Every structure is written in structure tokens, then in C-alpha cells.
């Protein structure tokens, strides 16, 4: 199984800051990487797929990059509504594994 | 619009079988795949399995021996059955529409299942 190591586990930032979340795959996943946002009591929302493609309706302050085994999610100009837990997921091979999540809070 | 909704018992006794239903609207199960994904309290997301549009299923090997996913296309429903439940199976269970690239683009609201006597 492909292991997804996500970092940091938690992150505190101020409004307007830029934050980056990393995801490391245990093998090459050929850009088959998605990012989800999950708020308490809500279902996960797809933010980005195929490493850098924004899902419909996702603000342009979210961006993704990476290749091979290393991927990242960047949130520019942090807004209060971005407080959430973020998960990466590899969709290269079954089982489709998720990272452990990054909890983003406001400083 | 695409909607998914999970339903099932909130409490299951240890060693018993969990049965959940995912009712979908705005899409056809003959052309769309659906997965089950769960999240234990305070933990991350775990992909459980998938039923593809052709009816083929694939399961996470960690729970494959206990899990079965099926569907009724005429009722737009996908079913999860998992036996020999343990307290570690306590989680929120989600169903999600899956694209051909195995991306989960629409999710249900989730149903909390507690395994306890």
C-alpha cells in the first residue's frame, strides 16, 4: 500500500498569511494527488485534484504543486473560513490512501 | 444536483454486523462509482472500498475479509455490510461519488456509528 505522510500535523497562522502543507508519498504517484478540506461536522470538500487542478468554486488562493513523491498545498492570504483540517489523498493505486491530516488554526 | 445520503443504525453491538445504505440522487449508479470512507473520532480518513459503475468491487485489504459493498441501481442505493464489528470500527461513515480517476468529488453528510455493548 502507498503510505501518505502529511506535515505538519497542526499549523497556526495569522489572517493574510501564506501557509504550506506538505504530503510525501512512499512511492511515485505520478501527480495523482488530491487535497480535501474538512470542517467539523461537515463532509470533506474536494479542493484540488491531479496535483494542481482547482475544483469548481474553490478560491484561487488555494494552489497545489509537486511531482513524484512530494506534493504541497499552498493557501495564500489566509481567510478565517480556511480554518479546517486538510487531507491529501493519492488516487494512483488502490487502496486509495489519505494523509493523516493537517489542522489549520488562526493565530 | 448530485447528492448522497447515508443511513443506518447509530449503535451496533460488538461482534455484530453493520449495515449502511447510501442513497444517491442526481446521478446513475450504472455510470458512476461510489466509495465508502470512514473517519474514527479524532483520526484521519480511511478508504474502505468501492463499487464501480460496472458493478465490480474493490476493498481495502485491511478490512476485506469483513466487508461487502453492493448496490441496487433501480433504487439508486449502495449498501455496505461489515461483520465482526469491534470498538475500533466506531467512526463516521461517508459514502462518496468517485470519478474515473478515483477522486472523491461529492460526499454524503456521513453517519456516526458507535460500536458498544
Image (cartoon, rainbow, N blue to C red):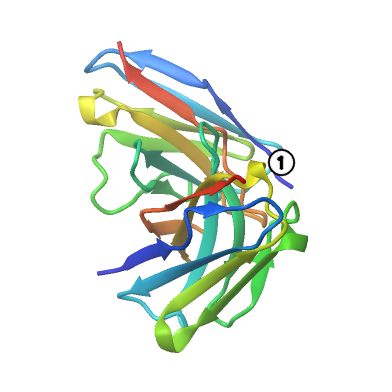
Q: Is the residue A43 above or below the residue A79 in the image? A: below
Q: Is the residue B73 above or below the residue B115 in the image? A: below
**Residue lying at 36% horizontally and 54% vertically, measured from the top left:** B109
For the N terminus of chain B, which image quadrant?
A: bottom left
Q: Position of residue B76 (x, y in %)?
A: 41, 80
Q: Position of residue B39 (x, y in %)?
A: 52, 43
Q: Is the residue A72 above or below the residue B21 in the image? A: above
Q: Nearer the viewer, residue A106 or A22?
A: A106
Task: Decide: few, some or many residues near mark 1? Use Cα within 10 Å; few <14, some 14-19, many ≥20.
Answer: few
Q: Nearer the viewer, residue A32 or A36?
A: A36
Among all residues in the image, which is located at the extreme bottom? B74
Q: Nearer the viewer, residue B64 or A58?
A: B64
Work out whether residue B100 can be spotted. Answer: no
Q: Which residue is mark 1?
A: A27
**Residue lying at 48% horizontally and 37% vertically, measured from the top left:** A87
For residue A89, what is the image quadrant?
top right
Among all residues in the image, which is located at the extreme top? A107
Q: Position of residue A15 (x, y in %)?
A: 22, 16
**Residue lying at 27% horizontally and 45% vertically, measured from the top left:** A58
In-image side of A8 versus B16 (left or right): left
Work out whether residue A90 can be spotted. Answer: yes
Mark 1 belongs to chain? A
Amino acid at each position: 500500500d502507498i503510505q501518505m505522510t502529511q506535515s505538519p500535523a497542526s499549523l497556526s497562522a495569522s489572517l493574510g498569511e501564506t501557509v504550506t502543507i506538505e504530503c510525501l508519498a512512499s512511492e511515485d504517484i505520478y501527480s495523482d494527488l488530491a487535497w480535501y478540506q474538512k470542517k467539523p461536522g461537515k463532509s470533506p470538500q474536494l479542493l484540488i485534484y491531479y496535483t494542481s487542478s482547482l475544483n469548481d468554486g474553490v478560491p484561487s488562493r488555494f494552489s497545489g504543486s509537486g511531482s513524484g513523491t512530494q506534493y504541497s498545498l499552498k493557501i495564500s492570504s489566509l481567510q478565517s473560513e480556511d480554518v479546517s483540517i486538510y487531507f491529501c489523498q493519492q488516487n494512483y493505486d488502490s487502496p486509495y490512501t489519505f494523509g493523516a491530516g493537517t489542522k489549520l488554526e488562526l493565530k | 444536483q448530485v447528492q448522497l445520503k447515508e443511513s443506518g443504525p447509530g449503535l451496533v453491538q460488538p461482534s455484530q454486523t453493520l449495515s449502511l445504505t447510501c442513497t444517491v440522487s442526481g446521478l446513475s449508479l450504472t455510470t458512476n462509482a461510489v466509495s465508502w470512507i470512514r473517519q474514527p473520532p479524532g483520526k484521519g480518513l480511511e478508504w474502505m472500498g468501492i463499487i464501480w459503475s460496472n458493478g465490480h468491487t474493490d476493498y481495502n485489504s485491511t478490512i476485506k475479509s469483513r466487508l461487502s459493498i453492493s448496490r441496487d441501481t433501480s433504487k439508486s442505493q449502495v449498501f455496505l455490510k461489515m461483520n465482526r464489528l469491534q470498538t475500533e470500527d466506531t467512526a463516521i461513515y461517508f459514502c462518496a461519488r468517485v470519478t474515473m480517476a478515483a477522486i472523491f468529488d461529492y460526499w454524503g453528510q456521513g453517519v456516526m456509528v458507535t460500536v458498544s455493548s
